[in-house]
Amino acid sequence: MSDAQHARVRVVIDGEAVDVEQGATVAAALAVCGASMSGTRASVTGELRSALCGMGVCHECRVTVDGRAHVLACQTLCRDGQIIQTARRR
């Protein structure tokens, strides 16, 4: 395997640094650190939501990335230094 296949990037999820493989989606990074189990956002009634369809149709995986709200985690690639906020920290 080449070094490119092992390249990693560091993102910050709800204040915690997480190293993930380069090319991973934000939804995958959330799953790695367990955030997807506790919800990525809250519905209008307060119910926690997380990724469902994995292809950008359901919009349940919306998070804030680098200050931009309502970003689809399943459609966004991680990049080094990215700041990701879920419903746990809002």
Image: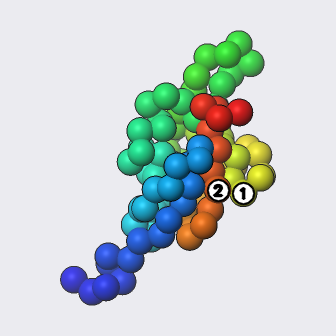
* Percent of width and height locating residue 45: 71, 13
Q: Quadrant for residue 86, please give it.
A: top right
* Percent of width and height locating residue 31: 42, 44
The residue tagged with tag 2: helix, strand or loop?
strand
The quarter of the picture where the C terminus appears is top right
Residue for point 74% across, 18% down: 44
The answer to whether the residues at label 1 and label 2 have Cβ atoms under 8 Å apart is yes
Vertical placement of 33 versus 44: above or below? Answer: below
Residue for point 31% across, 85% down: 3
Q: Residue furthest top?
A: 45
Q: Quadrant for residue 4, please give it.
A: bottom left
The residue tagged with tag 1: helix, strand or loop?
loop
Residue for point 41% across, 71% down: 8
Q: Quadrant for residue 80, please give it.
A: bottom right
Per the rendering, the mark at residue 90 is: none
Vertical placement of 12 versus 30: above or below? Answer: below
**Front residue of 58 and 81:** 81
Q: Residues within 10 Å of mark 2 (few under 14, many from 20)?
A: many
Q: Amino acid at mark 1?
A: Asp
Q: Residue furthest left?
A: 1
Q: Earlier in the sequence, mark 1 or mark 2?
A: 1
**Front residue of 39 and 10:** 10
* Percent of width and height locating residue 2: 27, 86
Q: How is the image coloured?
A: rainbow
Residue for point 40% across, 66% down: 21
Label 2 belongs to which residue?
83
The quarter of the picture where the N terminus appears is bottom left
Q: Amino acid at mark 2?
A: Ile
Label 1 belongs to which residue?
66
